[in-house]
Image (spheres, rainbow, N blue to C red):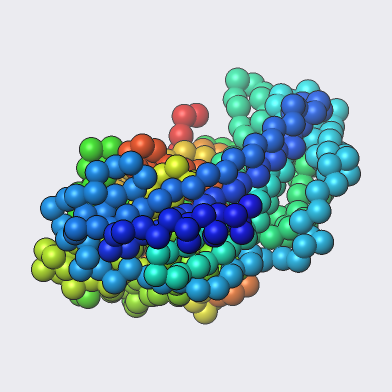
Amino acid sequence: MLETIRRRFQALQPQADFCSLRYVEEDNERLSVRQGRQQPLTRRHDRGAMIAVCDGGGYGYAATASHGVFDYRQIQLPKPQGRYQGAGSDAAYEWPRASLLDLLLSESAAAKGEDSRVVDWSASLFRQDIRQLYLTSDGGEAEQQLRALTPSLVVTAFAEGRVQTRSLGGQYGGLGRQGGLDLIAEAGLRGAGRRVADEALQLLYAPNCPSGKMDLLLMPEQMMLQIHESIGHPLELDRILGDERNYAGTSFVTSDMFGHYRYGSELLNVTFDPLLRNELASYGWDDDGKPAEKVWLIRNGILERPLGGDISAARARLNGFALDGVANSRACNWNRAPIDRMANLNVEPGDQSLAQLVAGIERGVLMQTNVSWSIDDSRNKFQFGCEWGQLIENGELKGVVRNPNYRGISANFWRSLKAVGDESTFNVMGTPYCGKGEPNQVVRVGHASPACVFGDVDVFGGAA
């Protein structure tokens, strides 16, 4: 198929300033069980191509009009060459359905046990196999193969009028990574059923999270959401330029902040790194052919660079802002045009172990695993809730608390960062459900982070 596409594109000989073809073929499959029963197997195969044309200063996709207020001939469009192979060996991608289904049924049964307080329990494995080919009229050619696996296990318990849910890595696919079946062991799925159920039961009888200003220790499972909502979306350059205003909102970040704005404390270092191979959104080139590279967005707390592809960066320069782009022009599939998206957006590790982080807290709460989120249209004021909380008193972890929540303002929250965990606290997370754009596009996003401590945060409990 790929060779046929190459020949047909070469035969087109388009009479335009620039032309590209992006072919995508994707296979998805989900194995799942719920309450001890196998759910219907879901499989999906999709393939197609999109052609982009730059001519006469306009830039259009497929049958869209090729004209506009910006002269796209000013942009040096990439001419990629090469092949990118995602993480893992071919053997690691074999898919023995029967044995994998047995694993899901076993962990599901362990989660339920004989306990009538466990009222819902499920486990699943979702895999993606994506092949892409990008061709340009000036001889560019880039081929990529990306494979990902997302394990999931969720348990809900009920007693005395209370309901609590505990999950492995979050209820929204937080353990997604690129790679093969070795990710099952990395995620800790085997043997997790009973442990996750026990934690749900602990939450049923735990006291409500206390309220007040205190230190907050966020583990990587919650840092993923914090990074995504209060760094990732605000830094998307098309959003800063106003493109998303009609649908997904704007940003408190403006084009004149880059190079000097204090986004966080001196401990905050944030990178965009599509080359971290096992993370969910790793790739060799973005969907406009720009080579992927690791780029610092925030260094020692100072905002340096936006999340904008070459086209958005050129538009910013037209408005008088000399902003460099990154390789984040991404489309969810062949039938959508690339727009500015997060990929692997990570907080770099610091120098403290988890024990040291805890020891430095006189009064606070450890929170883990997102369960709810709310943030305003400018991605500034937010309120997030977690599945799991533990009190910290005088440098020691104490009892479990339920319904832990916290709120803040992005522009101030990251400045309250007072300690950053080392490599031993670092974990690679990911989500397949980041939505944006008109028409809507849902893409895979990776977030890796150490545990982090924030000072003087507004913490509160949920409904008793």
> In the rendered image of this protein, does residue 170 appear above or below residue 423?
above
With 353 as the anchor, is 193 left or right in this view?
right
> In the rendered image of this protein, does residue 378 appear above or below residue 159?
below
Instruction: Say whether residue 139 is visible.
Output: yes
Instruction: Say whether residue 378 is visible.
Output: no
Q: Position of residue 52 (x, y in %)?
A: 36, 53
Q: Residue at x 85, y 47 (%)?
A: 96
Q: Position of residue 112 (x, y in %)?
A: 80, 31
Q: Residue at x 26, y 54 (%)?
A: 59
> In the rendered image of this protein, does residue 117 appear above or below residue 7?
above
Q: Quadrant of residue 295?
A: bottom left
With 303 as the anchor, is 131 left or right in this view?
right
Q: Position of residue 353 (x, y in %)?
A: 58, 73
With 29 as the anchor, is 318 left or right in this view?
left
Q: Residue at x 78, y 42 (%)?
A: 193
Q: Could you say which is closer to the camera, residue 189 or residue 176?
A: 176
Q: Position of residue 19 (x, y in %)?
A: 36, 59
